[in-house]
Amino acid sequence: MQTTPSNTKLSTTKTLLVTAGLAVAIFAAGCGNDDEADLANGKQLFVEKCGACHTMARAEAAKGVAGPNLDDAFIQARNDGMDDATIKSVTLGQIKHPSQRVPAAARMPADIVTGMDARDVAAYVGYAAGREGKDEGDLAKAGQPAVSDKTVKADSSNTLQIDADPTGATLYQAGKATAAAGLVNLIMDNPSSVPHNIAVKGAGVDEKGDVVGKGGTSKVSAKLKAGEYTFYCTVPGHEAGGMKGTLKVS
Ligand code: HEC
């Protein structure tokens, strides 16, 4: 993912953003310009980078549950008159300086997206959170979960190494795998700060490896006949977000 240097003006104003009453003033001071924001890019990134932990109905593939449902988080404020720009400012603040209310292991990592990408994601949340209805036009098409085109082949011990995306996206580094019939081993290293695992299902099989945090390794083995299976992450919302792939056994 491309990154641009973070905007220091935004980071210094952030501390104020949590005080919702001041957010409008900060927006007026130049915190963001919705005319320039690319909502489709924001939605795509939201699904890939935020959907691991958040659900928001308009971003249909974002079904994570480790963090708050963002419709629930903002619907009351929106109904009370909070506008898109203010929700955007609050979101940008949360991206740069995540709230520390929850225990460290369950916290939202800082700077998952930066620069223009952060602005686009925040603008999309500002537009979509707690807003009834569905996205239309080009925006409706954005936000399809990404799956890697890469294929991995099982090694001589019929073991597949399929690692999680290092940025915390709901993505494996390979989306296709091939192995021989018999005992198949799947191994996933997790270099990201979002918990993940590897599991395999299909043809009556459903075997799950342990969910592991950063630096952990999830392993699962299953006796598989020839056929097509799905490898996936069982953390709620992650398969829907694209953390899956096809395993061909022959
Ligand atoms: C690893 C899980 C995780 C990821 C990934 C994540 N978040 Fe969060 N997020 C959380 C948690 C947990 C909280 C609640 C923090 C708290 O209450 O202290 C939260 C809170 C929020 C809030 C505040 C909601 C409220 O109730 O005030 C917003 C807005 C938000 N996240 C947006 C995002 C965006 C945008 C992204 C992607 C760039 C993102 N999050 C990625 C876990 C995550």
Image (tube, rainbow, N blue to C red):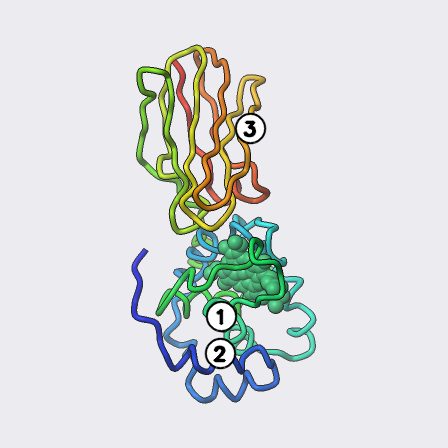
Residue 206 position, x and y percent, is 57, 23
Q: Which residue is mark 1?
A: 97
In the rendering, which numbered label is found on residue 235? none
Answer yes or no: is residue 81 visible. yes
Indicate the position of residue 217 as horizontal and vertical percent values.
45, 35
Ligand 1 picture quarter = bottom right
Task: Choose between 48 and 124: the one closer to the eye.
Answer: 48
* Mark 2 touches mark 3? (CB < 8 Å): no
- Quadrant where the N terminus lies? bottom left
Residue 60, relative to residue 108: is it above or below?
above
How far apart marks 2 and 3 lie (CA) works out to 41 Å
Q: Earlier in the sequence, mark 1 or mark 2?
A: 2
Identify which residue is drawn at 47% across, 57% down: 46
Mark 3 lies on residue: 208
Residue placed at 56% from the left, 24% from the top?
207
Q: Residue 174: where, in percent of width, then height?
A: 35, 35
Look at the numbered discs 3 and 1 and tell me whether their residues touch, using CB distance below 8 Å.
no
Tell me the element at label 2.
helix
